[in-house]
Image (cartoon, rainbow, N blue to C red):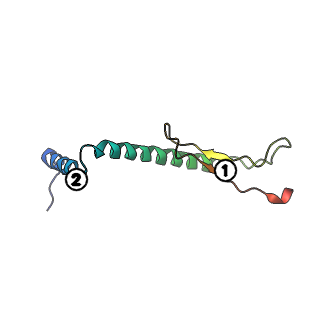
Amino acid sequence: MFGKIGVPEILLILVVVLLLFGAKKLPDMARSLGKSARILKSEAKAMKSDGQQQQTAPADPPQPGQDESTHRTIQAAPGDVTSSRPVSEPSDTTKR
């Protein structure tokens, strides 16, 4: 029923998208799509590295001079300062 998609069909799809969204919206949409892809990639990389660290290295007990209440921050994609957010990690409150 459906044949191969060739150059004329791709051009028709691009023209329809251009008519629907307008020439001014397309660069903004492409920019936000790229930003979302960078954030997703950095989050996946952070999750993967956290998983490898938990598997390979056991949690070390805190040293006497270290502060236990430090917070980590998930780093945003380069150039994106709005998506950095602090991460609250569980702390052991029984050692007070």
The residue wearing badge 1 is: 54
Q: Along the horizontal axis of the image, is 83 left or right of 51?
A: left
Residue 32 at what x, y percent from top left? 39, 46
Q: Which type of secondary structure does the marked residue at label 1 adopt?
A: helix
Q: Who comes first in sequence, dot 1 or dot 2? A: 2
Dot 2 amino acid type: Leu
Q: In percent of the image, x 16 and y 45: which residue is there?
A: 11
Residue 88 at what x, y percent from top left? 67, 53
Q: In percent of the image, x 73 and y 46: which residue is there?
A: 70
Q: Which type of secondary structure does the marked residue at label 2 adopt?
A: helix
Mark 1 vs mark 2: in front:
2
The residue wearing badge 2 is: 20
Q: In percent of the image, x 81 and y 42: which residue is there?
A: 66
Q: Along the horizontal axis of the image, is 7 left or right of 29?
A: left
- 88 and 57: which is toward the camera: 88
Residue farthest to the top? 79
Residue farthest to the bottom? 1
